[in-house]
Amino acid sequence: MKTLTVGEAQGRLAELIAEAHQGEVIVVTDGERQVWLDTHSPLDLETDNPELEAELLKGLEGPFTPYSPQEMRSIGERIIKAKRGK
């Protein structure tokens, strides 16, 4: 893995892209932020993996349901009580 700062990477982008295409892991940092050069294209759920799409949809549709207004109020009250108790 190769890690470079933005300053070090400036002017070398074509070279770094070529290295990434050859399998090298390239990370460019700007303080706390990081960007990885990756040769993989984004996953297209329609064509790449229908099984994964089905599993993701199951996770969205159930068994989790949104909180009711009463449940949200109760949660809020518990948080307020806990903060006041400190």
Image (cartoon, helix red, strand yellow):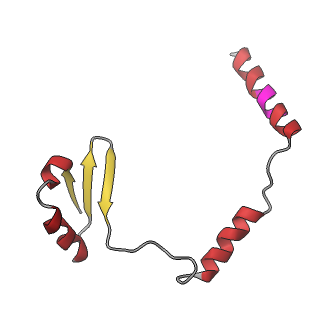
Q: Is residue 43 magenta?
A: no
For the point 71% across and 63% down, the residue is: 60
The reply to whether the magenta stretch includes residue 75 is: yes
Task: Using the rendered view, name the quadrant where residue 64 is placed.
Answer: bottom right
Q: Is residue 61 left or right of residue 71?
A: left
Q: Is residue 66 above or below residue 37?
A: above
Left or right: residue 54 versus residue 18 is right
Residue 23 visible? The answer is no
Q: Is residue 52 left or right of residue 80?
A: left
From the top left corner, tell me how far across and down residue 24 is, in percent. 23, 70
Q: How many marks?
A: 0
Q: Is residue 14 left or right of residue 41?
A: left
Q: Residue at the location (61% across, 76% down)?
A: 52
Give the quarter of the figure containing the N terminus: bottom left
* Residue segment shown in magenta: 74-78
Which secondary structure type mostly characterizes the magenta part of the structure? Answer: helix
Q: Quadrant of residue 37?
A: bottom left
**In x, y percent, where is residue 28?**
25, 54
Quadrant of the rendered image containing residue 49: bottom right
Frontmost residue, 64 versus 14: 14
